[in-house]
Structures are given as structure tokens and as C-alpha cells.
Amino acid sequence: MKKNKRKYLKHLGLVFISTFLFPYKFLLSASQKIINPNLTEEQKKIMFKDGTERPFASPLNNEKRKGFFHCANCGAKLFASNSKFDSGTGWPSFSESLPGAFKTKIDYSFGMQRTEYHCAKCGAHHGHVFNDGPKSTGKRFCNNGLCLFFKPEK
Ligand SMILES: [Zn+2]
């Protein structure tokens, strides 16, 4: 009887930990790695604590040149400029990523069910992908500008 009770309490403990602590990812998961030593606190907050920048804050919203968008942490090529479109949301938006650029995960925070995506190479959080994009793919990758840098095509 006593043993069962202990087992029950242990189970309750695990439920408590996974329910209340798991959404607050203060620690980097095993697949996440800070590679760029020059990341700012704001960039780290978005990329490794699932933060979001203010809308209309990123100069990349107005980037219209030909080229590629790369991960600000590891440099991986993530989006081609021809997939970028003006979603009006205030965040750089893309209809598709380059193949294999991201891994996705369901995010249940803020009482919503959204699909968040992470850089496949370094694990950094970049944004959420929605199914209300342009007709070509139907996808809208809503990306924090601070997680990206743009390299124009020469
Ligand atoms: Zn990366």
C-alpha cells in the first residue's frame, strides 16, 4: 500500500513537471546549439526561448532583392527570395522554405495550437507556419526577422 502511494506520488510529480514546467523552455534542448557568439540577447530570447519580435520591427520586411535568407545562428540557407511575400502581418513571410531547412513541432502555448519550426541544423526557433499562405503552396512561414540574415545574389 505504502509502495503504491509512493508510486502514485512519483507519477503525480512527473505529470506536474511535464504540465507546468515543460512549456517554459528555459534550458536549451539537446538539439539546440548557440553557434554564433555575436547573437544579441534579443536574438537568443527568440531563437532559444521561443520569443517573438515586435511586428513591423524588422528591416527584412522591406527586403525585395534577389538572394537567400540564412539562419542568424548557424548560417544555414533557409529561404529563397522568390518565396517571400508581403503578408501584411509585420513579420517576414515566405510561402515555402528550402528543402530540409526546418523541423516542425506543435506548439500549444497561449491556448492555441500552432506549428512552430526550428532550423534543422542548429535547432534555433524561427517562427510558426500557417495554412493561410498564397495559392502556390498554401503555406505562410511567419519568421522573426532577427533570426535571419539576407545575402543578395551577385
Ligand atoms: Zn540554424
Image (tube, grey):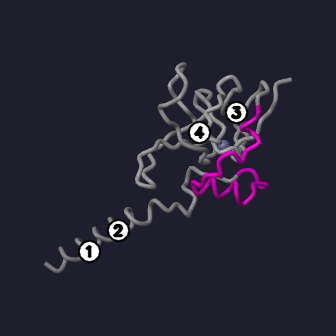
Q: Which residue is mark 3?
A: 77
Between marks 2 and 3, how big is the CA–CA gap?
39 Å
Distance from label 3 to label 4 (Cα)?
16 Å
Residue 72 visible in the snapshot: yes
> Crowding near pointer 3: few (<14 within 10 Å), some, many (20+)?
many
> Which residue is labeled 2 in the image?
16
In the image, which disc is placed on residue 9?
A: 1
Q: Which residue is mark 4?
A: 142
User: What segment is highlighted magenta in the picture?
Assistant: 35-63
Residue for point 72% across, 50% down: 35
Question: Which callout, 1 or 4, points to the residue nearer the camera?
Answer: 4
Q: Amino acid at mark 4?
A: Cys
Q: Earlier in the sequence, mark 2 or mark 1?
A: 1
- Secondary structure state at the residue bearing disc 3: strand
Closer to the eye: label 4 or 2: 4
User: Distance between the Cα atoms at labels 2 and 1?
Assistant: 10 Å
N-term mark: 1 or 4: 1
